[in-house]
Image (spheres, helix red, strand yellow):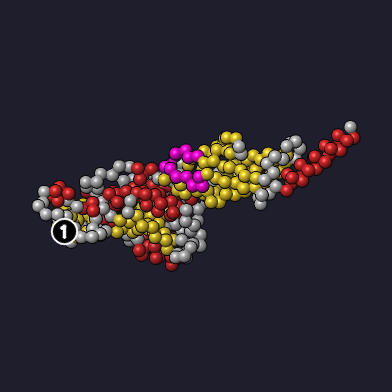
């Protein structure tokens, strides 16, 4: 009996030593895929894979998987040190990071150790539903343009002139039916009227301090409103620059948008941008460059910014207990149900 007891004591000591020796240095957590993207309300999944040394002596399981605030998550063990996590969000925007607590036990289940790791690189993109809404392509913004012509070439849907194709012209403007009926091999392209600006700059402005819940609500409505506005502008033939403040260099970030894939990237980039250390000069530069501004009602509490914003076409996200100093005539207070077409019309009429 003494020999058995001594053997068990030695084995227990070995198990204790092994369990306590396991740390984040010899335990690896992989998330596959490291980034997921879908629309708001979609349930998206990823696998959490645990890789560790001394697998014969220990068992490792995630005892806690904590998603960032605003993200609903549930997990299910799949075997072979793999746990499947399913997530969804009722907010539009980019949410990142996962906190995973790993519990390590020995083969005799005598000792345990807990390791907490933060997977900061995990990204969950929740796209706004507004970019799914169908936009008519024939006359996308009939309120704005009427029969007005810019009398020069541009990006309008209206025909301005015909000319021979030259390299780097838009192939979508080639009149294939007319080309097919011509005796020579010339390519004829349509030139669009300039009544619609070629590039529209959408400036995101977020300066006010908000708690996490307020931040999620603000960014959700800002992304939905921006998606609807951008949808209409792209359908009208415009290209977009989405600009916002950044803590990186350069301090003003510019996302070029020519299609809906780039629009999704731009909105996610904006929703993930920190705003705590940007200077007033940076916000002023965004306002100076922007043709249309997207902000919250709390940004209108700033005396300097509200005065400038009031002179721009603006989508201001409605926020409780806000006290705006100036609300311009071109400002649309947005709760998620308002029609943004008149706001788009103001931009295109400039």
Q: Is residue 28 left or right of residue 241?
A: right
Identify the residue under disc 1.
164
Residue 228 point in image, percent of width and height: 34, 47
Front position in the image: 165 or 280: 165
Q: Residue at horizontal 39%, vertical 60%? A: 254
Residue 153 point in image, percent of width and height: 19, 60
State the quadrant of the C terminus.
bottom left
The mark total stands at 1
Front position in the image: 333 or 188: 188
Instruction: Give the residue furthest to the left.
Output: 183
Residue 284, image quadrant:
bottom left
> Looking at the image, can residue 310 be seen?
no
Instruction: Give the residue furthest to the front.
Output: 184
Instruction: Give the residue furthest to the top.
Output: 1
Q: Residue at horizontal 35%, vertical 42%? A: 132
The residue range painted magenta reads: 33-45
State the quadrant of the N terminus.
top right
Residue 106, image quadrant:
top right
Residue 27 point in image, percent of width and height: 65, 47
Residue 313 point in image, percent of width and height: 32, 56
Q: Secondary structure at mark 1?
A: strand
Q: Is 22 included in the stretch rendered in magenta?
A: no
Front position in the image: 86 or 150: 86
Q: Against 59, is 311 above or below?
A: below
Instruction: Give the residue furthest to the bottom.
Output: 281
> Looking at the image, can residue 131 be seen?
yes
- Mark 1 surroundings within 10 Å by alpha-carbon count, few (fewer than 14), some (14 through 19), many (20 or more): few
Q: Is residue 76 left or right of residue 142?
A: right
Q: Residue at horizontal 43%, vertical 43%? A: 38
Q: Against 139, is 274 above or below?
A: below
Q: Residue at horizontal 45%, vertical 52%? A: 271
């Amino acid at each position: 009996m003494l020999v058995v007891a001594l053997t068990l004591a030695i084995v227990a000591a070995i198990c204790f030593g092994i369990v306590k020796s396991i740390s984040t240095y010899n335990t690896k957590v992989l998330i596959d895929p490291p980034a997921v993207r879908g629309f708001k309300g979609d349930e998206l999944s990823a696998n959490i894979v645990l890789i560790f040394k001394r697998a014969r002596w220990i068992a490792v399981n995630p005892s806690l998987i904590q998603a960032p605030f605003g993200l609903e998550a549930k997990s299910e063990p799949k075997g072979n040190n793999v746990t499947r996590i399913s997530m969804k969000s009722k907010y539009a925007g980019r949410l990142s990071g996962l906190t995973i607590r790993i519990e390590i036990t020995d083969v005799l289940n005598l000792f345990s150790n807990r390791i907490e790791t933060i997977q900061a690189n995990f990204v969950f993109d929740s796209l706004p539903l507004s970019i799914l809404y169908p936009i008519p392509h024939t006359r996308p913004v009939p309120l704005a343009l009427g029969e007005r012509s810019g009398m020069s070439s541009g990006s309008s849907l209206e025909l301005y002139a015909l000319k021979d194709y030259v390299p780097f012209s838009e192939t979508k403007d080639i009149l294939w039916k007319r080309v097919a009926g011509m005796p020579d091999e010339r390519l004829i392209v349509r030139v669009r009227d300039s009544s619609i600006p070629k590039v529209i700059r959408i400036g995101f402005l977020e300066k006010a301090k908000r708690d996490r819940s307020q931040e999620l609500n603000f960014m959700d409505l800002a992304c939905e409103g921006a998606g609807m506005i951008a949808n209409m502008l792209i359908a009208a033939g415009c290209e977009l620059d989405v600009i916002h403040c950044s803590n990186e260099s350069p301090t003003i970030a510019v996302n070029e948008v020519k299609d809906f894939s780039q629009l999704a990237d731009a909105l996610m980039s904006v929703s993930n941008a920190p705003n705590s250390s940007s200077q007033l000069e940076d916000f002023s530069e965004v306002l100076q460059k922007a043709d249309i501004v997207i902000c919250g009602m709390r940004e209108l509490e700033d005396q300097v910014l509200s005065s400038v914003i009031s002179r721009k076409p603006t989508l201001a996200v409605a926020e409780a207990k806000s006290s705006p100093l100036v609300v311009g005539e071109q400002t649309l207070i947005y709760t998620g149900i308002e029609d943004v077409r008149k706001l788009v019309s103001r931009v295109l009429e400039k």
